[in-house]
Image (cartoon, helix red, strand yellow):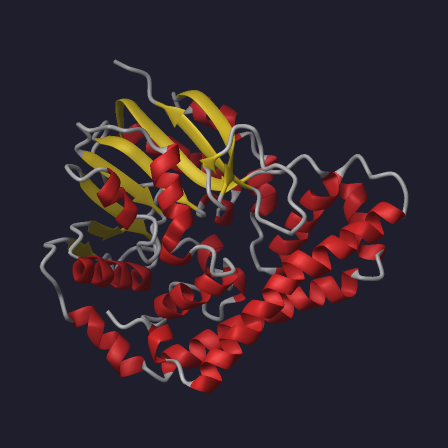
Amino acid sequence: MIDIEDRLTLDEQSAVDFILTLRKRWADTVYPTMVEEYQAGGAPEESVEAAAERLRDLELYPWYSHMERVQQKMLWKTAADAVISRRESLLAQYEEGGNAAGTLTLDASLELPTWYTDYDIHVQPGSFFSDDLSAYVYEFGARIVMLRDNDGYKFHRLFTETALPETAAATRVVDLGCGFGKSTRPLALRYPGAEVIGIDLAAPGLRLAHAEAEAEGVKIDYRQADARATGLEEASCDVVTGTMTLHEMPSEAVKETIAEAARVLKPGGTMAFLEFQPTGDPFRDATIFEHAERNNEPFFHDLFGTDLLAACREAGLVEPSWTPFDERANGMSPQGWGERREWHFPWAVLSAKKPEA
């Protein structure tokens, strides 16, 4: 498979480097300086709402917010230009096939929910579902979004290795909201004897996921479906996972997705979603909500405001829990995120089990 970054011109590489550096300095220099300005203004606020009001009054805040929004737009413009200029060669890869004998099942009649289509999520024009090239754009851009710390999809490998059970006898593992497969391929390594299925709403992402899995010789079955109604048989899955997908759904859809995960799990099976949770620091959490608004992710409030532990129990799951997740090295981090000066996503894992029969 072509890696666009291996073919960038000098001008394109310079643009990527500029945006990446801008994003890093926004996170590790501008944000900590803004925290210092906030702390110098008096005692910390006790609620996220009060902290958000003070946040917007800080002198540095307009620069902080402007840099975040502008760098995101620059990111997608640069990524899209690089992808579109290589359109024919990239699209040709969908037809090349491979030797992994995985499958790709698309459903042209699938009606995409309006909460999914009404927003350009992440400020990516046309979002992820609108064009076959949009998956390539997102794959390229996501590397910069994660400050190059997720190259090789380290986050997803850590999630698979530290948050999911060692189930040698697993026969079926499912990844809900699999995107272009970055979260699905590690599952095939974790559970080599299992049928691995990736499910997503977006056909472009599934086409790219399938092409990359075939090129890497990894057998995965990709299916276009709604995570709330997968079409999978009841009690047929040992593990159901998802990464970075629940926060892009309204509250009711999140609950329905958890209920579907519970339905398809075998007795004794495990559900685990890599997502976000409030850190407990009102100021930092206020910046998370602000990030969501500037990044066109309108359902962060739904995720944070919904009792998903209760939703798990209502779906018949047991031992529901949220566990902090340190993406830098350790993965699951029950002791918390620790002191971190830079702005960061508050990764956390929602997990639960289906009772034994």
Residue at the extreme top of the image, as rendered: 357
**Does residue 14 lie above or below 259 as drawn?**
below
Does 73 sit above or below residue 44? below
**In the foreground, 259 or 349:** 349
Q: Residue at x 36, y 48 (%)?
A: 177
Regarding residue 225, the answer to whether it shows in the image is no
Give whichever of 73, 160 is nearer the camera: 160
Q: Residue 324's x, y, as percent? A: 53, 34
- Taking depth in this image into account, of 90 and 314 the one nearest to the observer is 90
| Between 4 and 227, the one nearer to me in the picture | 4
Residue 7: give x, y in percent of width and height: 34, 80
Quadrant the N terminus occupies: bottom left
Residue in the picture at 23% in, 29% down = 234
Residue 60 in which image quadrant: bottom right
Image location (x, y in percent) of residue 301? 61, 44
Number of residue marks:
0
Residue extending furthest front? Answer: 329
Does residue 287 lie above or below 325 as drawn? below
Residue 355 is situated, as x and y percent measured from the top left of the image, at 33, 17
- Quarter of the image with the C terminus is top left
**Residue at left 25%, top 75%?**
91
Residue 244 seen in the current view: yes
Specify whether 293 is left or right of 100: right
What residue is drawn where x is 62% and y is 36%? 338
